[in-house]
Image (cartoon, grey):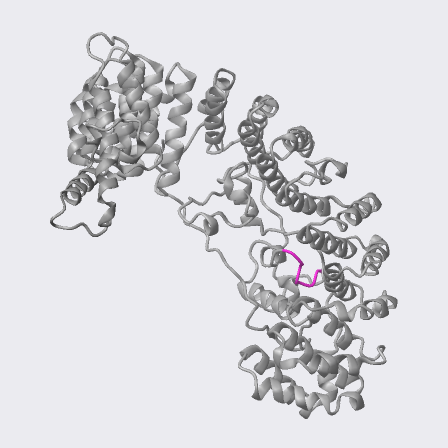
């Protein structure tokens, strides 16, 4: 009788879930069920029946395959097939494969490179889970590191370096003493990389040996790949320890540049990365080195091209000849444009780096802005970055082409991209004054289309245009107010409320427009509440009779019924000013505001310098200080040299926030001599007290705008007061590292 069929069938009269003690068929059914659950049927049932196969049966099957083959299988085909199955299961996170650890270790002794590769991969994966079992493989790895085949030696060394168990680490250190000077360059290259890997695992262990010194000696190796690997290892060690300084003299730099044509593409990136540690001592050194690496700009590998651009940008800091810099900048343009034909991910990295390069060296990219126009199949992140570059490259000469292109973008289906295109048009009106009217006409044309999200973005940028050009272009106010019902986003509401308050004396129904928003005052976000408070105060100062009943209610809501500290503080401030001296209040609240500027994500000089030293890396795509993104990254800065071109950036650029410039561009820092009232010189030997007074005077004249409220409150005769949202972020400069030459 087949216990898998007849027994079950005969037992159905009593039910499979409730067998009867006196029924023989039921007893047979119980035995049948127990055998199924224990997996015993794997030995007697047909293997093709997947219902009876259990995980432990699969392991047993693979174990049998590893043990099979015999002497007839000289190519170890059976073991190779079994190992392929094991590795496939391992990559799918099948932890049952760990039961085969001893069997796989036994296969490591087979003199087959393919078998060893798969066995070593298995060892790397499971050694941390079973370190005691992994120790059984240590003698085999030691033996393989002395194998006549250099590929086996390198494979064994690479494998043993992955296993962070004390016995394996000690064995790796001992083996490196010989393998760093191996007769085969492939083994030496692997050994150099292993040193950096071990340094990451145990810094003190490597520093207690002479392995770093031996890496230095490998820079004199006759094989270019070995030199490149040694440079890569030394650079990696340098990045992980701020007490180590990587120093390369001109002779060494010249030598490693000469091996570039002989290196493969990845070795070239290692060499080029290391060149940023070379500090030119003369202008000719920097020029000669830059000219020698220029041919790498035409390489097919994007990493090589970006690394070469980084080195040339770095060397330009040590070149004083403007003509030579101009020539080098022209050579950087074609490779950057070529990268735009690469896959989207490479394009994005190239475009983000182009933003940095444009800020540092505006003459690099061509004046033909069309190369950065968006394609229909570009991903959104590429389109947005191209939009930033279009804004940066726009001038009064090409503004017509740019506006036509941006108008096309405003008809796209991607809402996020359309918003950014509309905002770019408004920022261009602020950036290029002669083209302001043309930009405004384009915005009005888009507003008349009555697409809600376009209207809201246009309202925000039109507010900024009014701030840039006060008492101009007021003819468009009626058009903007005509779309007031389309506004439902906080930023757009705050913008239209600012316009109503600022031009309350010219808008006949300003009070009724504000009253509509005040009816939902308690439901509005803080951004809109702040704007409504300021706009109501402005309406009262310009048309007292219209706001005489409105203002007390708003002040009461802000000071007595609000939990927001900014709103309460501003409400109390207005209440006190308006109740004590309305005339003085008008001079403060309705004073002439400093015009704003539109600078596209302008970075401070220190951040820009550091990011330019990281061109081609992921650190640059965020356009933020590297350590804000990668906390463990070592800060980079230009090393001092007799030929280092000192920065001459304006003091205000170092403290202004990115994006819209909030500082008054017409405000200049007074000289120390004019403030001190004496004959102190402005440069060396200046009176420190005079410098402090100059800084105080500068900050007194500095105006910060409250973008959230759509207004700023400033007494021109007193120290500027900012809200809680304001502030500066200072990055303390790091101290010089200890001078340890590599």
Residue drawn at (27%, 26%) of the image: 47
In this orientation, which residue lies closer to the viewer: 158 or 232?
158
Q: Where residue 402 appears, x then y in whole percent?
A: 79, 45
Main SS class of the magenta portion in the image = loop
User: Is residue 153 in view from this perspective?
Assistant: no
Q: Where residue 704 appears, x then y in whole percent?
A: 64, 67
Q: Where residue 108 appears, x then y in whole percent?
A: 22, 20
Numbered range of the magenta stretch: 659-665
Residue 489, by quadrant, is bottom right
Q: State left or right for residue 510 relative to residue 152.
A: right
Q: State left or right for residue 432 relative to residue 282.
A: right
In the rendered view, tell whether residue 380 sits above or below residue 423. Answer: above
User: Is residue 292 in view from this perspective?
Assistant: yes
Residue drawn at (21%, 25%) of the image: 63
Q: Where residue 255 appears, x then y in whole percent?
A: 46, 20
Residue 725, by quadrant, is bottom right
Q: State left or right for residue 454 relative to residue 154.
A: right
In reply to whether residue 261 is colored magenta, the answer given is: no
Residue 721, by quadrant, is bottom right
């Amino acid at each position: 009788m087949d216990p898998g069929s007849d027994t079950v069938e005969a037992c159905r009269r009593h039910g499979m879930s409730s067998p009867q003690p006196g029924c023989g068929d039921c007893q047979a059914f119980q035995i049948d069920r127990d055998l199924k659950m224990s997996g015993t049927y794997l030995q007697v049932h047909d293997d093709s029946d997947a219902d009876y196969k259990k995980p432990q049966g699969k392991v047993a099957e693979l174990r049998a395959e590893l043990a099979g083959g015999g002497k007839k299988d000289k190519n170890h085909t059976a073991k190779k097939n079994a190992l392929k199955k094991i590795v496939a299961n391992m990559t799918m996170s099948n932890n049952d494969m760990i039961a085969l650890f001893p069997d796989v270790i036994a296969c490591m002794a087979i003199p087959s490179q393919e078998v060893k590769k798969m066995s070593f991969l298995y060892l790397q994966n499971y050694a941390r889970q079973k370190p005691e079992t992994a120790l059984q493989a240590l003698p085999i790895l030691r033996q393989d590191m002395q194998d006549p085949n250099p590929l086996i030696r390198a494979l064994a060394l690479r494998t043993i370096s992955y296993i962070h168990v004390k016995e394996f680490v000690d064995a790796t250190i001992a083996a490196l003493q010989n393998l760093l000077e191996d007769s085969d360059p492939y083994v030496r290259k692997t050994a150099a990389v292993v040193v950096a890997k071990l340094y990451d695992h145990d810094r003190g262990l490597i520093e207690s040996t002479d392995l770093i010194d031996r890496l230095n000696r490998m820079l004199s190796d006759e094989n270019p790949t070995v030199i490149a690997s040694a440079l890569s290892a030394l650079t990696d060690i340098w990045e992980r320890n701020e007490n180590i300084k990587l120093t390369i003299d001109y002779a060494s730099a010249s030598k490693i540049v000469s091996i570039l044509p002989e290196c493969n593409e990845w070795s070239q990136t290692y060499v080029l990365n290391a060149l940023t540690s070379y500090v030119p001592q003369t202008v000719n050194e920097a020029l000669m080195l830059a000219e020698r690496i220029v041919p790498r700009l035409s390489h097919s590998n994007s990493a090589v091209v970006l690394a070469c651009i980084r080195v040339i940008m770095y060397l330009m800091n040590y070149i004083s000849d403007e003509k030579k810099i101009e020539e080098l900048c022209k050579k950087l343009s074609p490779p950057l444009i070529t990268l735009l034909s690469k896959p989207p991910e490479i394009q994005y990295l190239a475009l983000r780096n182009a933003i940095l390069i444009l800020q540092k060296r505006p003459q690099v990219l061509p004046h033909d802005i069309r190369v950065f126009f968006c394609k229909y199949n570009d991903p959104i992140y590429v389109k947005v970055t191209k939009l930033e570059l279009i804004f940066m490259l726009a001038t009064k000469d090409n503004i017509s082409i740019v506006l036509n292109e941006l108008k096309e973008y405003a008809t796209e289906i991607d809402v996020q991209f359309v918003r950014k295109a509309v905002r770019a048009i408004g920022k261009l009106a602020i950036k290029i004054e002669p083209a302001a009217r043309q930009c405004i006409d384009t915005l009005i044309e888009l507003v008349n289309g009555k697409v809600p999200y376009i209207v809201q973005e246009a309202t925000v940028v039109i507010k900024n245009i009014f701030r840039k050009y006060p008492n101009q272009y007021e003819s468009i106010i009626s058009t903007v107010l005509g779309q007031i019902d389309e506004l439902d986003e906080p930023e757009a509401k705050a913008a239209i409320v600012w316009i109503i308050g600022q031009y309350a004396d010219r808008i006949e129904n300003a009070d009724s427009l504000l009253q509509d928003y005040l009816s939902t005052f308690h439901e509005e976000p803080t951004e809109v509440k702040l704007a409504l408070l300021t706009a109501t105060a402005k309406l009262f100062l310009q048309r007292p009779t219209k706001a005489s009943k409105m203002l007390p209610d708003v002040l009461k809501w802000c000071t007595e019924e609000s939990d927001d500290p900014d709103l309460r503080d501003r409400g109390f401030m207005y209440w006190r000013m308006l109740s004590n001296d309305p005339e003085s209040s008008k001079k403060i609240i309705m004073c002439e505001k400093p015009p704003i500027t539109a600078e596209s994500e302008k970075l401070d000089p220190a951040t820009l310098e550091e990011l330019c030293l990281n061109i081609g890396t992921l650190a640059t795509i965020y356009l933020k200080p590297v350590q804000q993104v990668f906390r463990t990254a070592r800060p980079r800065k230009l090393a001092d040299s007799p030929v280092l071109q000192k920065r001459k950036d304006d003091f205000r650029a170092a403290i202004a926030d990115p994006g819209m410039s909030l500082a008054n561009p017409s405000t200049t820092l007074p000289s120390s001599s004019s403030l001190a009232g004496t004959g102190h010189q402005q440069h060396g030997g200046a009176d420190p007290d005079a410098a402090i007074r100059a800084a105080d005077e500068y900050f007194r004249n500095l105006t910060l705008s409250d973008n959230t409220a759509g207004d700023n409150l400033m007494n021109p005769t007193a120290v500027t007061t900012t809200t809680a949202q304001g502030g500066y972020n200072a990055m303390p400069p790091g101290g010089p590292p200890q001078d340890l030459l590599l």
